Amino acid sequence: MITKKQKEAVLNEMVEVWKSAKSMVFYNFNKMNAEDMESFRKKVRENGLKAFVCKNTLMEKSAEKAGIDLSTLSDEMLIGQTGIIISYEDPLLGPKTISQIIKEKRRPAIKGGFFEGRFLSSQNVKDLASVPSREVLTQQLAYTLLAPATQFASVLNNTVTKLVYAIDAVKRQKEAQS
C-alpha cells in the first residue's frame, strides 16, 4: 500500500509532467501479457519517451493542481487501468510510437491524449500519429514553393523554343523561295 508521503511525491511529479510534457498518450494496458509489456517498454525507451502507470484519482488531482481544465475530459479516459506515455521533446513521437506498437501487437488500446493544452480523443491521437515527420513536411513545403517558379521557367522555355522554331521555319521558307 502506498503511503501518504509517496502519494504526495507522485502527485508533485505528475504536476510537473502536466506542466512540462509536450504530449501525453493515455492507454489501457489491460490484457497485455509480460512479453507484450517488455516489448512495449523497450520501444518506448528506444524512442526516448517515458511511460508509467498512475492512479486515475492522482492524475485528476495533479491535473487540477497544474491548472488543467478537466471539463473537456471524456468520462472513459480515466476509468480502469491507465498508463501514460509522455513526450518531452517531439510532441508527435508518443502517438507515433504507440500506433507502431498497436500495429505490431494489437495492444494496448489508446484511451486518449493531451496535446498542446487540450485533451484528445483516441481518434485524434491516431490522426496525430499519421502526421508526417518535420523533415517530410519541410520537403513538401519546399517543393510546393518551388513548383510555381519551375512551371514559370518551363513556360518561358517553351515560348523561346516556339520562337526559335518559327524563325527557323521562316528561314527555310525564304531559302526555298530563293
Image (tube, rainbow, N blue to C red):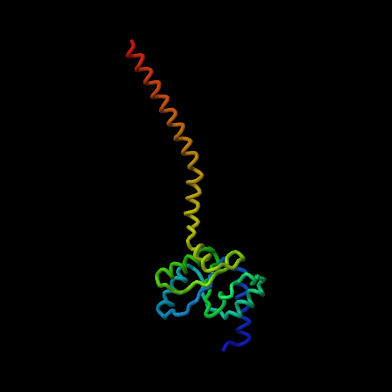
- Residue found farthest to the front: 75
- Residue found farthest to the top: 178
133 lies left or right of 61: left
Q: Residue at x 41, y 27 (%)?
A: 162
Q: Nearer the viewer, residue 40 or 158?
A: 158
Q: Is 134 placed above or below 64 here?
A: above
Where residue 119 sits in the image (x, y, percent)?
59, 68
Q: Nearer the viewer, residue 169 or 38?
A: 169
Q: Residue at x 37, y 20 (%)?
A: 169
Q: Residue at x 64, y 78 (%)?
A: 61
Where residue 105 sits in the image (x, y, percent)?
40, 72
18 lies left or right of 133: right
Where residue 88 sits in the image (x, y, percent)?
55, 67
The N terminus - image quarter: bottom right
Number of on-image labels: 0
Where residue 24 sits in the image (x, y, percent)?
55, 69
